[in-house]
Amino acid sequence: MFDRILYPTDCSDVAIKAVSYIEQLKEAGAKKVTILHVLDKKYLYETAHEVFVDFAAIENSQRKIVTEECNEVVARLRGKGLDVKVRIEKGIPFQEILRVANEENASLIVIGSHGKSNVQEMLLGSVSEAVIRHAIQPVLVIKR
Ligand code: ATP
Ligand code: MN
């Protein structure tokens, strides 16, 4: 039922908290986990307003940081015997999450209720809210 999990992460504390739930989903039949990080297009371009900016260099260093941050999670999940893949996409986070969920034929999306901004007054972050609203797959929301 939950054999193909999509785990979108911004490497925030709340997102990391979701990992132990994914580990436990192995017992519910989880086999494959796709870890997805979206390089936010808006943020990528806002960081660089100068004229001579090497977008490719910024993007590459972002990819490197994310890949390193994901390594520990990959090891943990592989250690549980799960088949793990990492995808890094560029775009609008919620749109990429929805697209990859369909592309990977996910049976469940596991997402944090909040992320890096983690504004206390907000019931849900904007990414998780849009994913819950638009996804056709079941969504497991891990709260902070
Ligand atoms: P906001 O971004 O609206 O200011 P926030 O950062 O507190 O609020 P969200 O961004 O909605 O909250 O984060 C909720 C969850 O969505 C995270 O725990 C993570 O699982 C996922 N997420 C957020 N941003 C990304 C991203 N760029 N790539 C992949 N997953 C993400
Ligand atoms: Mn966020």
Image (tube, rainbow, N blue to C red):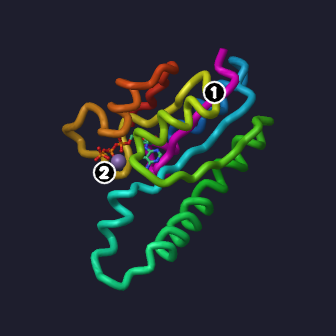
Whether label 2 lies within 8 Å of ligand 1 gets the answer yes
Identify the residue at the far bottom of this view: 52
The x, y position of residue 111, in whole percent, is 47, 34
Label for residue 117? 2
Magenta stretch, residue numbers: 1-16
- Residue drawn at 65 percent across, 54 percent down: 72
Q: Secondary structure at mark 2?
A: loop
Kindly indicate the quadrant of the structure image that contains residue 114: top left
Q: Amino acid at mark 1?
A: Asn
- Residue 79 in the magenta stretch? The answer is no
- Residue drawn at 60 percent across, 35 percent down: 20
Front residue of 18/34: it is: 34
Q: Which residue is mark 1?
A: 105
Q: Secondary structure at mark 1?
A: loop
Q: Quadrant of the N terminus?
A: top right
Identify the residue at the far top of this view: 1
